[in-house]
Each structure stands twice: as C-alpha cells, then as structure tokens.
Image (cartoon, helix red, strand yellow):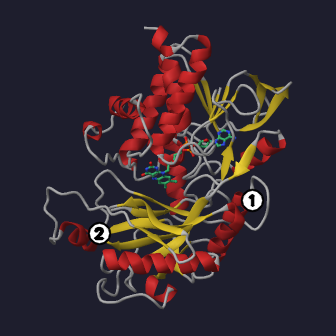
Amino acid sequence: MIIGTGPAGLFCGYLLAKHGYRPILIERGKRVDERSKDVEAFWAGGVLDPESNVSFGEGGAGTFSDGKLNTLVKDPLGRSREALSIFVAHGAQPQILYEAKPHIGTDVLTGVIGRMRDQIEAWGGQVRFGLRADGFRIKEGRIEGIFLSDGSFQTCHDVVLAIGHSARDTFLWLEKAGVAMEAKSFAVGLRVEHPQKMIDSLQYGVSPRSKFLPPAPYKVTARAQDGRGVYSFCMCPGGYVVNASSEPGRLAVNGMSYSGRDGKNANSAIIVSVTPQDFGQEGPLAGIEFQRHLEEKAFAAAKGEVPVQRYGDFSPYATAGRIPDGFEPCIRGKWRYADLSAVLPQNVKIALEEGMAQFGRILAGFDDKNAILSGVESRTSSPVRILRDETLQSNIRGLYPCGEGAGYAGGIMSAAMDGMRVAETIAAKYAPFHAQA
Ligand SMILES: Cc1cc2nc3c(=O)[nH]c(=O)nc-3n(C[C@H](O)[C@H](O)[C@H](O)COP(=O)(O)OP(=O)(O)OC[C@H]3O[C@@H](n4cnc5c(N)ncnc54)[C@H](O)[C@@H]3O)c2cc1C
C-alpha cells in the first residue's frame, strides 16, 4: 500500500506495478483533472479546499510546479535517467533526456501524471482518490493495516509513506502512533519578482535575448552576518507566483511556470535557513508550528489574499533605477499590497535584506525598490524527518517513510528516485526486479 501519489508514491507504484506487483495507491486529494478545476477556482477567488489544492491531489505538490527536473542527488544506478524516460514515455518533451536543465511545465505535467496512473491501473495496480490514511494498526512493532477516512480498514504489511511535507494532520497522528521522527532544519523567506527581460539582459549580456535562447535562469547564494545561508530557490523563468495554501486561515506561496515559460516575470524564493533552535518550542513537530505561525501572519497581512510589497517599501536598503515604476506582479491567485515586514521573524528579515544587497552586486537591480515581494515562502522542504534504517523501514516494521515529507528528497526528481529506491527495496524481499527478467 502506498500513501500519497506525489512523485515519490507515483514512481514507487509505477515501478512495482511494472514488475507484476499490484500496489494500492491512496490519495487524499482528487484526480488531476478535477483537482486542476479546484485549484483554478481557488485562484479565481473561491474557497480553499483543504483536501484538493496545490499541495494535495494526484501528482502531489509537483503538479502545479515549474517542472524543473534537475537534481544534485548522487545516482550511480541511473534512476534519474529512468525517471526521465518514464516521463517521456507518458508524454513529456523528449529533450528532457539530454538537456542540462530539463523542464516540463505544469500544462504538460498534468497530462503525464494522468497517463502514468492509467498505466499503473493497466498493469493491475489500484489508484484510489479522496481517501486519506488516518491511522495505523500496529502489533508488536509491526504494521498490520491502515484506517482510512471512509471508515474502512485496509490490511497491509508493507506501507510506503509518501505523504509530502504539507500533510500536517498526518504527521500529528504518526507521532502519536509512535513513529520515530525528529525536527529538521529548513528555510523560509519570500518570493521575489523581476522583469524577465532584465534577467535575460544580465545573464546573456544582450537585450532582447536571441530567439534561440530560453528565458534566463539564475541562482544566487549568500551568507548573512549571523551565519545563516540566504539563497534563491525554485527559480521560475517566465513564471508565476502561486497561492499554494493548504490550510484555512494560513497562506503560503510558491512558484510555477508553463512549458513555454512565457510569463513576463522571473521569480524565485529568497530563503533563509532556520534550525530547530529558531522554532520556539521543542519536539519533532516544532517546525510545523513555526511554519503555521508565519502562514497565519501572511494570511492576516492581506485579508486572505497573497500579500505583495515592493522591495523599496520593505527595506530601506533598496537601490533604484533598474526596474521601472509600474512593474506589476504575475500571480495566480488574488493578491493585494500589504506590509510583509512583520511576517518574517526579525532575524530572518535582516538576513534576507543582507542577502538581497549581496545579490544586487551580482545581478544589478536584484535589490531594486520596484522588485516585488510576496509571501510567505514556508514550504521549501520538510520541517520533519521520519527516521528510517538501512532497510528503509521506520521503527515500525513494514513502514517505509519515503520522499520529501519524510525528509529524504527535495524536489520532483529526488522524490521520484526515492520512490523507486523504496520500490526496489520492497521487491527485494519478495521477487527482486532484476531477477524477474
Ligand atoms: C508550486 C510548487 C512548485 C514546485 N516546483 C518544483 C520544481 O519546479 N521542481 C522540483 O523539483 N520541485 C518543485 N516543487 C517541489 C516538489 O513538488 C516536491 O519536492 C515533490 O512534489 C515532493 O514529492 P513527494 O512525492 O515526496 O510529496 P508530494 O508531492 O507532496 O505528494 C504527497 C501526496 O501525499 C498525499 N497525502 C498526504 N497525506 C496523505 C494521507 N494521510 N492520506 C492519503 N494521501 C496523503 C498528498 O495529497 C500529496 O498528493 C514544487 C512544489 C510546489 C508546491
């Protein structure tokens, strides 16, 4: 049984089904087509559905993403190549197999995910939507089955926990069930937007860029005076900032793009590292409470819409002259101007300003007064690690923590690869994949 159909759960299920196993995948959210409608309705000003949003539903958090497919994970067994080939076999652009920075785009990714699900079902697996795992039955330290949100109980002895990093209610009952976990460091900050034309001209040295060149990306890193890392994350050339909230009364942003990357703005998260010492309380779930606190402040700042602020209004250290007055954000979801300076803890705000000043020396105008900030970027990686041993099982035997939520991945590709690794490990107990040919 696999809980969650993000990249980790989906690729785990895909590989198992391909090799003759009959995995059951359960997903609290909806199928990707229905989910897309819910997300569009929310962005148009509708009510947030806590079970069907940018974080929850078929394809997981990666579905409404930029679809960047690069990873820095060591890969001696070629899982990355295999994952990219699976994407291509289900409709992704073939050039992702050879490009240095492969990119799918949310419009293509949604179709790919649906076709991967069709394939899993064609091989004999099951994918069940609108079904949440709400508890385990554990006997003598071993998993016996799962209590589901429809009131049923599913007996199972191998459970892959691929729940992503936003399933806060699930982390809560996992802790109560005695699953060993610990708080981990992550990073928080704000999204920043600049004109894509400005980034192109800085990166390529010509303006406009050649039609043979893609909208330019960037990556910037700095160290604040107090030692915190400050860096750009999830940079989306020609992209959009999205309202990526999943809990009522709390607001989080993220970034995405379409395959053409033809939005007029470049955006990235500028984030600052935070450690368990910053969380203000003890315990494995302290980082979740820290995130929630920031998201509540972001929600309140603009009455539930995405709070947006020009950098010059956020910081007295902004520069001027590179971005014209009247520069507007590209945001999917309602937004309004607000004061973001109180949303972040003061030490994070100071580190972010120091980072912006350093980035402005690398990319002139990065810290321009007309650059646009939005917030809060709080879901950069999991604030929790669910411990697992060399057999990839937790202290509860038969339970395989997997992917980003468990703390073993940080992006679509690394989550997919971790899912594949867990699939290989489970299969090795019964009939290893390589022995089946
Ligand atoms: C807007 C956005 C843009 C992004 N852009 C990129 C990008 O360009 N490139 C990149 O590499 N990464 C990107 N990411 C990050 C990437 O999406 C994640 O790293 C990745 O999706 C993690 O995969 P996962 O399978 O571990 O978890 P998730 O994708 O989070 O999937 C977990 C799934 O489990 C389900 N679930 C949770 N709890 C339960 C439960 N109790 N019962 C049943 N189901 C449950 C959830 O509904 C969800 O579908 C982006 C993320 C977002 C939000």
Q: Is residue 106 above or below residue 206?
A: above
| Residue at x 19% of width, y 66% of height | 204
Relative image position of residue 106 (x, y in whole percent): 40, 49
Disc count in the image?
2
Q: Amino acid at mark 2?
A: Gln
Residue at position x 83%, y 29% from top?
Answer: 137
Circle 1 sits in a helix, a strand or a loop, which is it? helix
Up the image or down, 266 lies above or below 357; here it is: above
User: Going by the image, does 303 lie left or right of 110?
Assistant: right
SS category of the residue bearing label 2 = helix
Q: Is residue 16 visible?
A: yes
The residue identified by callout 1 is 286
Q: Nearer the viewer, residue 156 or 43?
A: 156
Please give the name of the residue rendered at 26% of the width and 36% of the height, measured from the top-left corner: 94
The quarter of the picture where the N terminus appears is top right
Q: Quadrant of residue 96?
A: top left
**Residue 6 at x, y = what percent?**
54, 40
Q: Is residue 406 left or right of residue 11?
A: right
Q: Looking at the figure, which quarter contains the C terminus?
A: top left
Query: CA gap, disc 2 to disc 1?
Result: 37 Å
Rendered image: mark on residue 196 = 2
Residue at the outermost right position = 140
User: What percent of the width, then of the height, locates residue 138?
Assistant: 83, 28
Q: Is the residue marked by circle 2 packed among few (<14), some (14-19), or many (20+) residues within 10 Å?
A: many
The answer to whether the residues at label 2 and label 1 have Cβ atoms under 8 Å apart is no
The amino acid type of the residue labelled 1 equals Ala
Q: Earlier in the sequence, mark 2 or mark 1?
A: 2
Crowding near the residue tagged with mark 1, few <14, some 14–19, many ≥20 C-alpha atoms within 10 Å: many
The image shows residue 277 at horizontal and vertical percentages of: 71, 65
Residue 153 visible in this rendered orientation of the protein? no
